[in-house]
């Protein structure tokens, strides 16, 4: 599924199951919470912190999907065409960074 269709799918889900979008500030707080859940898994599973027993069954993919869902909500309710924005960003990064990482000695 491309980003444009994902935005439509989220909008349809909100209309069918969610009643309405939470306001933008609530969704921003929710996004922060979801990113925190991703950070917790990464810090404990891949970082130096020990993983608690209660965290071992957490699904990183599910938590990342929660982040994407809220980002799509924010894009929808603020009128952002995320597909267009992402395509522009990828083009910009390609032009700006095409040799930057290849020439970075730290990455060798």
Image (tube, helix red, strand yellow):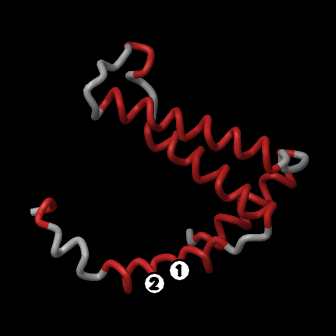
- Quadrant housing the N terminus: bottom right
* Residue 95 image-quadrant placement: bottom left
- Above or below, 12 against 29 in this view is below
Dot 2: element:
helix
Mark 2 and mark 1 residues within 8 Å of each other at the beta carbon: yes
Q: Which mark is residue 87?
A: 1
Is 27 positioned to the left or the right of 57 in the image? right
- At 79% from the left and 64% from the top, the residue drawn is 78
Separation (CA) of disc 2 from disc 1? 6 Å
Tell me: residue 108, above or below residue 52: below
| Left or right of residue 107: residue 17 | right
Q: Look at the image and tell me in which quarter the C terminus lies.
A: bottom left
**Above or below, 71 relative to 7:** above
Where in the figure is residue 47, as x and y percent of width and height?
28, 32
Callout 1 secondary element: helix
Examine the image and state in which quarter residue 48 appears: top left
Residue 65 falls left or right of residue 22: left
Alpha-carbon neighbours of circle 1 within 10 Å: few (<14), some, or many (≥20)? few
Disc 2 target residue: 91
Which residue occupies 54% across, 41% down? 35
């Amino acid at each position: 599924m491309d980003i444009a269709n994902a935005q439509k799918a989220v909008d349809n889900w909100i209309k069918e199951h969610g009643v309405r979008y939470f306001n933008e500030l609530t969704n921003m707080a929710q996004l922060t919470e979801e990113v925190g859940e991703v950070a917790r898994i990464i810090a404990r599973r891949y970082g130096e912190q020990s993983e608690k027993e209660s965290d071992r069954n957490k699904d990183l993919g599910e938590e990342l999907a929660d982040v994407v869902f809220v980002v799509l909500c924010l894009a929808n309710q603020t009128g952002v065409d995320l597909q267009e924005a992402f395509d522009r960003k990828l083009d910009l990064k390609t032009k700006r960074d095409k040799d930057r990482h290849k020439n970075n000695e730290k990455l060798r």
